Image (tube, coloured by chain):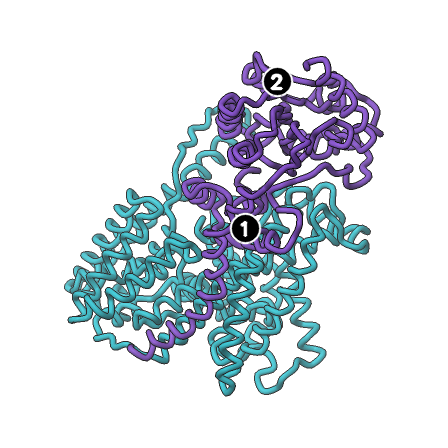
């Protein structure tokens, strides 16, 4: 069930009314409802894979309890390894089996040993990377005594399967979300209104920005051999907005829906395209995943307070694992490597934490230097997205070859470019609204807050844009991860 | 909570009026556009079909005829149009239906469900077909948007969205192998070998045959000619399928061996000059059949 589908438009109000009017007797009944509707929500894709969520839930629930009970470091370590093994084996089989087999066979064939490929037609269960990382963080935190284990199965199962963020995050930490399942939830008018606003903005990002950009991106990438460098760069630019609109739109809807049920999820995107350097970009993009890797991989590896060679190793490992998390494809690996390459200089020059606050925090406009830094960072990010979007390394390299050729100086042209003019106007509108709201959690959080009537008209305008300029419906990009 | 729900209702109410109002209005009224569609009593030949008929059959050359063909009109839409038109226009005794190889290729299924195409016909269709189209188009918002636009325009325009007319070939095109490959790839490519044909168009093609029989209308298929380079690339199994589906039917056609690009500017559509030549040929053939 997609957030931008009619099914969800019917599902959400029904669950909302049941939650606050029928199952509102106590926390148990509300949690029970959340668990059931989360499983129903997931079953819209494939009910068979509920078993995987259930396995993860049961394994980590009992391991968590046993971790709390045990004082023996040896046993605790074994329990942690067991959790890692179970969760990563499931993830590994469904996500990476074919990739490893194919590359293994190709390597042998390369050296003259003929092996037959045994690729299986494995369906990737939606959301597996997200809920696996969520439950893993729970077990690791219990192991490190950062949090207490949950002794309430209903609460824990609801935490693992909470439908707004089940299939594409944000990847919540148990320390933030799990306690919310144990506290009484009262309806908060202000929070619910914020939730609706955030859902509206998320729908705009997805339906208007991402889906329209997707059409142009598909056109440009499908004819990449015939197009000029400037056109391909335009394609990368559109993809940058497609993936941002798509994924941050999804996160906005997930956070907004959670607010309606009295939950507060973590911020997942914080205006990443207003970043002044790559390090800042990675503090603002897919925050729940970046901080996951920071806390559970980068810092345990030694973080940045190590020798230069070790620092290079740490950064490379984090970006490669992050790339691999996205998918079993060499294009993602190249994407990760390129990002590592772009970010490493800032670590060496000790400038990776130069820009912590949002740009122009205390002023209306940027200064010239900030503007140049933002444009340059965005350009670098667009280059990395080419690998992310390309079907294979060859296609990505061909696109790069064309971009860095004389044809970059020509005026972009491709069959279908006529549709881009209105899209560019919509993107400019989007950037302006994001800029105005950059100090808030989401762009329209406090827009026109002292002008109620105009603000309502603005909401109608957003709805009108969604109705008048929807792109062809595309699956959320991050569902494939 | 009460305030929250009240405010939501207050916010949504004008939206419902603005958005759902026209849909409800058109749902109940639009069909009369079609039932009231009257063809001049002097006309007894109706030309229907897709772009091949729209660009290739000039009704000013064929006596007592009117061309109402539309771009990308699949047989599903043609059938529901004819179902009403033949009921209210008993003067029609001959139907000239454009029917070429691509009409039975799988790509016609995608074309049928494109929101732009659905939009032109949506409100005149039966309810079960409306629901099927919404479901298949996978973009309900877009489908309803295009449909509502088109039918609101219908309220004020002389020409209805679902009724086409003969048109000259729209733009100058320089035929090239690359261009023909693109068209072939669009019409016959991107399908797997087990799923080559448009079952939907075949089903509705047969329904049109039955409808003509029931209405005592003579059905004549028109296969507009193709450029030689294009024809050579039409997959053989599609040609076999075409011959099988149209077996025992009257077909007017010219050889698919044209090389003159003045006549065939893009490989499978006739230019205005080509339409004149072909329409004269159709007229001659109709006189022979008569």
Residue B182 percent coordinates (x, y): 69, 33
Label the cyan chain with its letter: A
Judge left or right: residue A338 versus residue A2.
right
Q: Residue at x 42, y 70 (%)?
A: B13
- The answer to whether residue B77 shows anywhere in this view is no
Q: Residue at x 41, y 41 (%)?
A: B128
Rounded to the nearest whole Å, what is the CA distance between mark 1 and mark 2? Answer: 34 Å
Name the foreground residue: A217 vs B158: B158
**Chain letter of the residue carrying label 2:** B
**Chain letter of the residue carrying label 1:** B
Mark 1 touches mark 2? (CB < 8 Å): no
Judge left or right: residue A371 versus residue B32.
right
At label 2, counting other C-alpha atoms closer than 10 Å, the crowd grade (few under 14, some 14-19, many 20 or more) is: some
> Hey, which quadrant is residue B105 in on the image?
top right
Q: Say which element carries label 2.
A: helix
Name the foreground residue: B12 vs B97: B97
Q: Compared to B8, does B268 lie above or below?
A: above
Which residue is identified by label 2?
A: B239
Q: Compared to B214, does A274 lie above or below?
A: below
Q: Say which element carries label 1.
A: helix
In the rendering, what colour is chain B? purple
Q: Compared to A314, does A351 lie above or below?
A: below
Which residue is identified by label 1?
A: B147
Name the N-terminal-most of marks 1 and 2: 1
- The answer to whether residue A480 shows anywhere in this view is yes
Q: Residue at x 74, y 27 (%)?
A: B63
Q: Residue at x 71, y 53 (%)?
A: A418
At label 1, counting other C-alpha atoms closer than 10 Å, the crowd grade (few under 14, some 14-19, many 20 or more) is: many
> Hey, which quadrant is residue B184 in on the image?
top right
Residue A437 percent coordinates (x, y): 54, 77
Residue A292 percent coordinates (x, y): 40, 63
Residue A175 percent coordinates (x, y): 30, 70
């Amino acid at each position: 069930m997609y957030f931008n589908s009619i099914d969800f438009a019917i599902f959400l109000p029904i669950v909302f009314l049941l939650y606050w009017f029928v199952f509102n007797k106590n926390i148990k009944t509300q949690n029970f409802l959340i668990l059931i509707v989360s499983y129903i929500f997931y079953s819209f894709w494939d009910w068979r894979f509920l078993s995987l969520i259930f396995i993860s839930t049961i394994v980590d629930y009992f391991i968590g309890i046993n971790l709390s009970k045990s004082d023996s470091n040896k046993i605790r370590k074994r329990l942690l390894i067991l959790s890692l093994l179970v969760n990563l084996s499931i993830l590994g089989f469904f996500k990476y089996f074919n990739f490893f087999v194919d590359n293994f066979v190709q390597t042998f064939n390369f050296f003259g040993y003929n092996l037959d490929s045994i690729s299986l037609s494995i369906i990737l269960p939606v959301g597996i990377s997200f809920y696996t990382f969520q439950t893993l963080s729970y077990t690791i935190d219990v192991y490190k005594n950062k949090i207490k284990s949950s002794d309430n199965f209903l609460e824990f199962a609801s935490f693992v399967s909470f439908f707004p963020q089940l299939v594409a995050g944000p990847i919540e930490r148990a320390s933030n979300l799990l306690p919310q399942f144990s506290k009484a939830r009262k309806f908060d008018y202000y929070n619910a209104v914020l939730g609706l606003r955030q859902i509206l903005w998320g729908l705009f990002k997805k339906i208007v920005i991402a889906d329209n950009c997707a059409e142009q991106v598909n056109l440009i990438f499908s004819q990449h051999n015939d197009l000029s460098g400037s056109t391909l760069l335009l394609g990368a630019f559109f993809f940058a907005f497609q993936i941002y609109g798509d994924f941050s739109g999804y996160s906005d809807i997930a956070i907004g829906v959670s607010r309606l049920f009295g939950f507060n999820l973590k911020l997942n995107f914080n205006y990443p395209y207003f970043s002044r350097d790559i390090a800042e970009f990675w503090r603002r993009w897919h925050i729940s995943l970046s901080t996951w890797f920071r806390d559970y991989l980068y810092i345990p590896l030694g973080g940045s307070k190590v020798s230069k060679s070790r620092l290079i190793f740490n950064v490379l490992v984090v970006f490669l694992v992050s790339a691999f998390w996205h998918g079993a494809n060499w294009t993602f690996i190249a994407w990760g490597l390129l990002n590592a390459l772009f970010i490493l200089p800032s670590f060496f020059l000790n400038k990776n934490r130069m820009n912590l606050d949002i740009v122009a925090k205390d002023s209306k406009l940027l200064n010239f230097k900030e503007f140049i830094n933002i444009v340059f960072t965005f350009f670098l990010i667009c280059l990395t997205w080419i690998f992310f979007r390309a079907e294979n390394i060859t296609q990505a390299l061909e696109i790069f070859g064309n971009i860095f050729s004389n044809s970059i100086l020509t005026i972009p042209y491709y069959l279908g470019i006529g549709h881009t003019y209105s899209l560019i106007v919509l993107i400019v509108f989007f950037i302006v609204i994001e800029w105005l709201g950059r100090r808030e959690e989401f762009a329209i959080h406090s827009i026109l807050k002292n002008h109620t009537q105009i603000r309502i008209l603005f909401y109608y305008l957003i709805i009108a844009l969604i109705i008048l300029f929807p792109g062809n419906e595309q699956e959320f990009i991050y569902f494939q991860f | 909570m009460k305030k929250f729900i009240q405010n939501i209702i207050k916010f949504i109410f004008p939206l419902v009026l603005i958005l759902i109002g026209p849909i409800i209005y058109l749902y109940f009224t639009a069909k009369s556009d079609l039932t009231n569609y009257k063809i001049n009593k002097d006309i007894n030949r109706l030309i229907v079909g897709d772009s091949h008929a729209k660009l290739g059959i000039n009704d000013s050359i064929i006596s007592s005829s009117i061309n109402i063909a539309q771009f990308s009109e699949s047989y599903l839409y043609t059938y529901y149009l004819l179902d009403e038109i033949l009921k209210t226009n008993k003067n029609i005794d001959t139907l000239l239906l454009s029917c070429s190889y691509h009409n039975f290729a799988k790509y016609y299924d995608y074309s049928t469900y494109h929101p732009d195409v659905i939009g032109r016909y949506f409100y005149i269709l039966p309810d079960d077909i409306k629901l099927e189209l919404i479901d298949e188009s996978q973009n309900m918002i877009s489908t309803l948007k295009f449909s509502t636009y088109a039918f609101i325009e219908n309220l004020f325009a002389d020409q209805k969205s679902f009724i086409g007319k003969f048109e000259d070939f729209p733009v100058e095109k320089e035929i090239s192998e690359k261009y023909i490959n693109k068209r072939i790839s669009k019409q016959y490519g991107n399908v797997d070998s087990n799923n080559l044909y448009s079952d939907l168009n075949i089903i509705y093609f047969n329904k049109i045959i039955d409808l003509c029989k029931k209405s005592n209308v003579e059905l004549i298929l028109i296969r507009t000619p193709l450029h030689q380079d294009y024809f050579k690339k039409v997959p053989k199994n599609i040609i076999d399928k075409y011959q099988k589906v149209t077996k025992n039917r009257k077909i007017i056609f010219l050889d698919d061996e044209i090389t003159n690009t003045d006549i065939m500017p893009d490989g499978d559509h006739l230019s205005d000059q080509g339409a004149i030549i072909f329409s004269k040929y159709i007229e001659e053939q109709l006189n022979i059949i008569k």
